[in-house]
Image: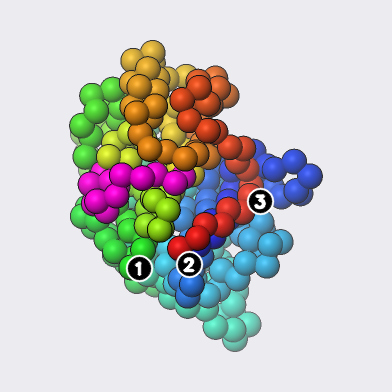
Amino acid sequence: MKVTILTDNNTIIDRYFLGEPAFSAYIEDENCKLLFDTGYSDVFLKNAQKMNIDLSSLDFAAFSHGHCDHTWGLDFLIRYFCELEFEGKCHKKPILFAHPATFKSITAEGYSEIGSILSENKLEKFFKMQLKKEPQKITDRLLFLGEIPRNTGFEGKQYFGKKENETDNDYVMDDSAVVYQSSGGLIIITGCSHSGICNIIEYAKKLTRENRILDIIGGFHLQNPSDIQMQGTLEYLKNQNIKRIHPCHCTDLKSKIKLAGVVSVEETGSGLQLEYEN
């Protein structure tokens, strides 16, 4: 299995790819091609083309949640699909996995829109939609986690605006992740971990009945975290069977340094490619 980081805040030194404060990853496993999040712009598409990754042949797409830095690139993917059609070229209609609330509009104080700018109805023209709160099997080894139970007590406490037609604050209950079950343990790919990285790990372990964690790739949502959240995360991680992690996107430098005290932290950025044995 191979994971390619198409978009991250950072880029890998001496690899000349684009970066932006967003996230997108491309996952390949045998005959499966999956795009996980699309970032904020067309950066993911440009980087994919530079790496000779053919997004016209995607089998699946999955979305961690609906925020703009993870879904706004969808506009450029759809433009790409339309341009292929204009030129008489084929593209697949991928199956799209996400939480039912992922593509709702979100407003926040001072911002007209921080959620998806494409509706579910529009996306149905280009994707086979699978929007469920429950976990969904993508392949025999790949699992979309669906809505993550929040049990730790020190995570998942931040809200971000309000979703359309709702009066309560949005705690990003649509936040999810993808997990790959390899022979060496679990590989967890996250977007932002609004539900909490520890909650995500626990749910992945519960669903797969596997306690070994080979790698965790993606945003940990540790941006100037509270002392309670940071300490709780460190205490949890040091007691887990985790070989290494690749925290990026919404994980600040101070948090990475603290994480490195309890688990092996690896550099991450646009252009990074990671391969794992099945």
Query: Circle 3 sits on which residue?
Result: 271
Foreground disc of the pair 3, 1:
1
* Amino acid identity at mark 1: Thr
Label 3 Cα neighbours within 10 Å, binned few <14 / some 14-19 / many ≥20: many
What residue range appears in magenta? 203-215
Foreground disc of the pair 2, 3:
2
- Judged left or right of residue 5, residue 118 is left
The residue at the point 38 percent across, 29 percent down is 237
The residue at the point 79 percent across, 44 percent down is 14
Residue 139's disc number: 1
* Amino acid identity at mark 3: Gly
C-alpha gap between disc 2 and disc 3: 18 Å
Asked if residue 38 lies in the magenta stretch, the reply is no
The residue at the point 38 percent across, 50 percent down is 186
Residue 86 pos. (x, y %): 59, 80
Residue sitting at the far bottom? 88
Residue 90 pos. (x, y %): 54, 83
- Is residue 169 positioned above or below 90 on the image? above
Query: Circle 2 sits on which residue?
Result: 29
